[in-house]
Image (spheres, rainbow, N blue to C red):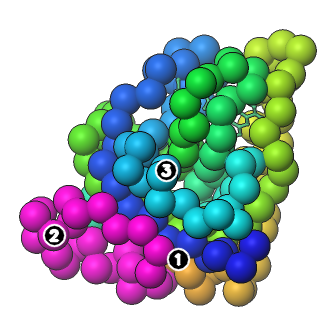
Amino acid sequence: MKSLPYFSRGEVVRGFGRGSKELGIPTANFPDSVVEHLPGDISTGIYYGWACVGSGDVHKMVMSIGWNPYYKNTKKSMETHVIHTFKEDFYGQILSVVMVGYIRPERSYDSLDALIAAINHDIEEAKRNLDLPEHLKLKEDNFFRATASTSTTTSNKIMNGH
Ligand SMILES: Cc1cc2nc3c(=O)[nH]c(=O)nc-3n(C[C@H](O)[C@H](O)[C@H](O)COP(=O)(O)O)c2cc1C
């Protein structure tokens, strides 16, 4: 995928809320405007990369792009699980992400437990891959520092790409 690494930023909006309640794996959803801007060569599926909420620290993340076949969603979504324990949810805050690599296509599973196991497997793969030097350097990218130094008005603008 020639568009990787892909930088994206947007406000965190409410999804169906199943990530926290049913899966125990909270995800932050991007608004439609961000999903619609994805380049054509970024296929649906599971990705890993780096993420930062507001002007906070940069953490490892996994992201699911698509229609969640297990739940048969009718609207395409872009959902990020930040690999960090947050004290509170962050709806309405600005999430900045860089997608670095692709893990697998989305698929349906026979049970909720199987879906949860697959996501946990993705998380472990993301953690390992992101420790590679070529991926670690993206954690320090100016894209994340720009959020910290810009005013709220500027950081609220949705930016896609670089
Ligand atoms: C790393 C990761 C992998 C995922 N893989 C799949 C998948 O293979 N199939 C699927 O139907 N949903 C997958 N999901 C999406 C979850 O089903 C979704 O996050 C959950 O339904 C919560 O959505 P909600 O926040 O809109 O409630 C994945 C999510 C993440 C974070």
Q: Is residue 2 above or below residue 98?
A: below
First reached walking from the N terminus: tag 1 or tag 3: 3
Q: Pinpoint residue 155: horizontal percent, then vertical percent.
A: 21, 66
**Mark 2: which amino acid?**
Thr
Query: Residue under circle 2?
Result: 154
Q: Pinpoint residue 54: horizontal percent, then vertical percent.
A: 28, 58
**Mark 3: which amino acid?**
Val
Figure quadrant of residue 6: bottom right
Q: Are marks 1 and 3 in contact (CB under 8 Å)?
A: no
Is 159 positioned to the left or the right of 138 in the image? left
Q: Pinpoint residue 89: horizontal percent, then vertical percent.
A: 34, 34
| Region of the chain picked out in magenta, as a range | 140-162
Query: Residue under circle 1?
Result: 139
Query: Residue under circle 3?
Result: 35
* Residue name at image x 15 percent, y 70 percent: 154
How far apart, in angstroms, are the residues tagged by discs 2 and 1? 21 Å
Mark 1 close to ligand 1, CB under 8 Å: no
* Residue name at image x 39 percent, y 85 percent: 142
How far apart, in angstroms, are the residues tagged by discs 1 and 3? 22 Å
How far apart, in angstroms, are the residues tagged by discs 2 and 3? 20 Å
